[in-house]
Amino acid sequence: MKTIEFQENKQIKGWPYVNSEYFEYGEYKLHYRIDEAKGKEKGKLFMIHGFGCNTTFYNELAEDYTKKGLRCVRVDLPDFGYSTREVKGIKYVNRVDMLIALMEYLDKQEKNPDKWIVVGHSMGGSVTLDIAQRALPIIKGYMLYAPMFMFNVPKLMSKMFQMKWMGAMMDTALKYVMPYDALVKVVLLIATMSPRYIAHYDASLAANPLRLKDTGKGLCYMSSKASHPPYEDMKKIKEPVLLVWGGLDLFVPGGKVKKLTESLPDSTDVHTIKLAGHCVVQNFHKKCCEYGIEFLKANKMY
């Protein structure tokens, strides 16, 4: 299958989506999308996806929240979706710095900007908690859906991830896996635990961005920089936090669920959707939205 080249110019046919935008930061281009609130705007969400995902992961949840009057900004992390692939030699920038800069940039477009509610799923939840450690005045709350910490990669392993053969091996693996929708759906089935949802899911939404040039190399480079915020720092978060787990999550072990839940502030609003898998915001998007709106109302953010 021919590699899909990265599209940088909005005028080029095939640009990702009608509402696609790019934010430049150093040598990076972050792809993001803005879904405007329906009716009067009551708040704004900054949505960060998990490993292997992209902005389409939040399709259903973004639609639910916009109907409730919330503007949704969905962003592709570096190496995912239609954002820059990190390859050896790039002038590396911490992704948290870029995400904060994007929020600040968007705020400058408004006369009286409201504060952000940051939403993170899986790896995006780990990134969200990294952002929370900054205690930024532009943020007023956090929503965590099945957050999963990346591991703190040892120096020796970091060097291995950046080796040329490792990137080439990952590119080859993606080349032979991504063309097959059935294989993609198997992974998604394990992640959602919902055959009914996957039966009607368009696998290309997840697969196409992973077919982009240098995605394998980018994933290796990203993994070489992996880290997560210290558990002991979670209690320091001052803003309200919503935490939603899936009862059938096969990606986050029960011990990790318990550890993170107990590490967050005692005021954290915690929910478990018993029949949900790791990708709880997809097939249980309505319940996730319901918990989100209740959380925002309870904390006077809506």
Image (tube, rainbow, N blue to C red):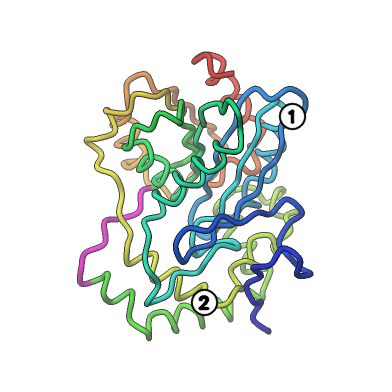
As measured in the structure, the alpha-carbon distance from the residue carrying label 2 to the one carrying label 1 is 37 Å
Q: Residue at x 51, y 31 (%)?
A: 117
Q: Tell me, yes or no, whether the highlighted magenta stretch contains residue 178.
A: no
Determine contact: label 2, label 1, CB under 8 Å. Answer: no
Residue 68 located left or right of residue 191: right
Q: Residues within 10 Å of mark 2 (few under 14, many from 20)?
A: many
Which region of the structure is painted magenta? 149-156
Q: Residue at x 29, y 33 (%)?
A: 234
Residue 187 percent across, percent down from the top left? 57, 61
Could you say whether the residue bearing mark 1 is in a helix, strand or loop? helix
Instruction: Determine the image quadrant of residue 68.
Output: top right
Overall secondary structure of the magenta stretch? loop
Q: Residue at x 46, y 46 (%)?
A: 101
Residue 171 located left or right of residue 204: left
Q: Residue at x 74, y 59 (%)?
A: 202
Residue 5 percent across, percent down from the top left? 64, 77
The quarter of the image holding the N terminus is bottom right
Q: Amino acid at mark 1?
A: Lys
Report which residue position mark 1 lands on: 67
Image height of 268 relative to 118, above or below: above
> Closer to the N terminus: mark 2 or mark 1?
1
Image height of 23 relative to 145, above or below: below
Report which residue position mark 2 lands on: 214
Instruction: Determine the image quadrant of residue 41.
Output: top right
Image height of 252 relative to 152, above or below: above
Along the line of sight, the residue nearer the viewer: 153 or 246: 153
Marker count (numbered): 2
Residue 113 percent across, percent down from the top left? 56, 28
Q: Amino acid at mark 2?
A: Asp
